[in-house]
Image (tube, grey):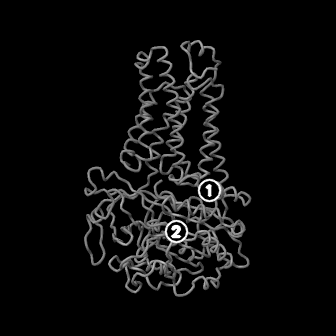
Amino acid sequence: MPFFPRAEAPQARAATSKLDLDALVSQTVLCLVVLGALAFLLRIPRVLARFWHRSEWTKGHRLGYTDTVGPSHATTISFNAATSSPSGYLKEAGSSQESHSSYEDPKFAAMTRPQRDPNRPLPPHISPNPSFLRPVVSVLRSPVAPGVSYMQVFICLGYLGVLLYPSIYRSRGPFVDIKRYGYISVAQIPFIFALSTKNNVIGTLLGYGYEKLNFLHRFVARIAIVAANLHGFGYFYKWCLLKTFQEEIQDKHNFNGLFMLICLDGLLLTSLPFVRKNAYNVFFYSHIVFSIGAVARARLFPTTPRWDSIWPLLPRFSVLITFSVSSKHGRLSRLVRPIPELGLTRVEIPTINKGWRAGQHVRVRILSSAMGITGWAEVHPFTIASEPGNPEGLVLMCKKSGHVDAETFRSGVYESGRARYWGGIQGLVERPYGGPGFAVFNSFTAAVFVCGGSGITFALSAAQELIQSDLRGDSRVSVIELVWVVQDPSSLLPLIPQFTAMIQQCRYTRLFISVHYTKALVGNSKVPGVLPPGLTLSPGRPQLISLLESTVSLAVNTMGRDESASGMIVGVCGPVGLGDDVTKSVGLIDPEKRDLIGGIEMHEETFGW
């Protein structure tokens, strides 16, 4: 069978047996939908556990405000930028090999923690996989490349394998059976749009944020573009052989197809990693223009009646996208405090104090002339650094990103004592995105949070939410280990008061915070001296494997006789390299310790997705 057609292509085409391409591709789409439905059915137990309590039904979906704050014994952290480096914690720089530990071992006191009320209902815990699959999951979770796991590769290969069926079934070659690749390309449009939206149906049903499914969106889109090019260049090749290219391209349907192909190739070129990282606005606006152009021309392209049923759904789908972006918009009174030691700006929004879960992020748009002509259109994600019900409201720690930097925050800011208030600037805070999905942090026996640099925002939110659950008595967590990796030890200074208050608030749970700095001490560096119990400062990178195993042992030893282990959650937030290191360390934990704690689950929030 020839791969390329000869000049007598019409005779070869006439000899081809009839094949219902419409039905063939429809069966493939149905197969993909069934596989997705099967994945959802397997996660139904975790869905029920996630919404075990009525208060969980509204968390993580829409921001809001309530007059009711957290427990009466919750402490509001007094944070003052002017006094963020308390002199009582300072000492002159010493050797980089010096360990700055607390003056007593806090883990000894953890062995005698008070027991919870046995009549208090605790959240149910459902493991994401059976115990006999834990070794397999550990391998699939391992990174095969920076930011890419074996599980992601397996999913992409499975998707590609399903599409091979309509691609090669009774096919005589890509330049002979040209039409089928057009069907395959168009069939991917609903999946591409579904995976591209922030609150998409697929992520909602499976419990994953849009950033976790972004790899699949890119993969499916590239499959569609490759199929479209095979379809288009197949016709170009045939027309060139027959010397009818100029006549054929003047046909309006063929011209629409060429225009659509140009738009798809433009999408591919402007979405390359180099463009996304160095010219994000080019990537963003070109995505909008090329997507509209491709869909509009595809509507004018000749189709069969069955595929015509897709196009009326696209406007309705766009309406759903608009309403899914639930935003809180208005003149917000924001308290802005710079944290020079961290290179961050702390922003408090007291008019929003509910509606999110630990680990979620919001997208902020500043509607101010200080942003420039097109700056108002910039939307930047920031991880929430506070727990719901906090009297301070929604707290963000914003790192310099585009136009959103210290200069922007200073515009419209007026002085009031030692604090700076942001007034007179319109802001748009879009609904919380991402987060742990169906994982319930307070249903685990132990929790470990590893973060790097500004990733401390995730750990603060998660730890404070667990502390509030501990104060209410509805948390299974007995040990929380927070590991923060920074370059300079002075980064710890502004957060010492908050860390101290968090440690003191714990009732049944024990919180240990270890800060590791990787930069050698030189000159008159500010180094914390004696630290409160439960807080340590050490040079060098953390030994993750030994830290995880010691946390497992401590959690098991502090369990009551009637308690059963319900697993350990390991959360990581930081650069891609840090996430890969933590994932590798989790996979190297002693299998006996892993099974002793009831399995280990990971939640990863990495920069640069």
Vertical placement of 62 versus 539: above or below?
Answer: above
Q: How far apart are labels 2 and 1 at the CA level?
A: 22 Å
Q: Which of the 4 image quarters holds residue 63?
A: bottom left
| Residue at 50% over, 72% down | 540
Q: Nearer the viewer, residue 221 or 320?
A: 221
| Residue at 57% over, 76% down | 470
**Residue 93, how many percent across, how many down?**
40, 81
Q: What amino acid is at disc 1?
A: Arg
**Could you tell me which secondary element the residue under label 2 belongs to?**
helix
Vertical placement of 317 versus 130: above or below?
Answer: above
Q: Nearer the viewer, residue 519 or 220?
A: 519
Mark 2, Cα crowd under 10 Å, few <14 / some 14-19 / many 20+, is many
Q: Is residue 308 left or right of residue 297?
A: right
Q: Which residue is mark 1?
A: 141
Q: Which of the 4 image quarters holds residue 591?
A: bottom right
| Residue at 64% over, 46% down | 37
Q: Is residue 298 left or right of residue 410?
A: right
**Could you tell me which secondary element the residue under label 1 belongs to?**
helix
Vertical placement of 455 versus 418: above or below?
Answer: above
Q: Nearer the viewer, residue 71 or 177?
A: 177
Tell me whether circle 2 and circle 1 mark residues in contact (CB < 8 Å): no
Checking the image for residue 462, the label placed there is 2
Q: For the N terminus, which image quadrant?
A: top right
Q: What amino acid is at disc 2?
A: Ala
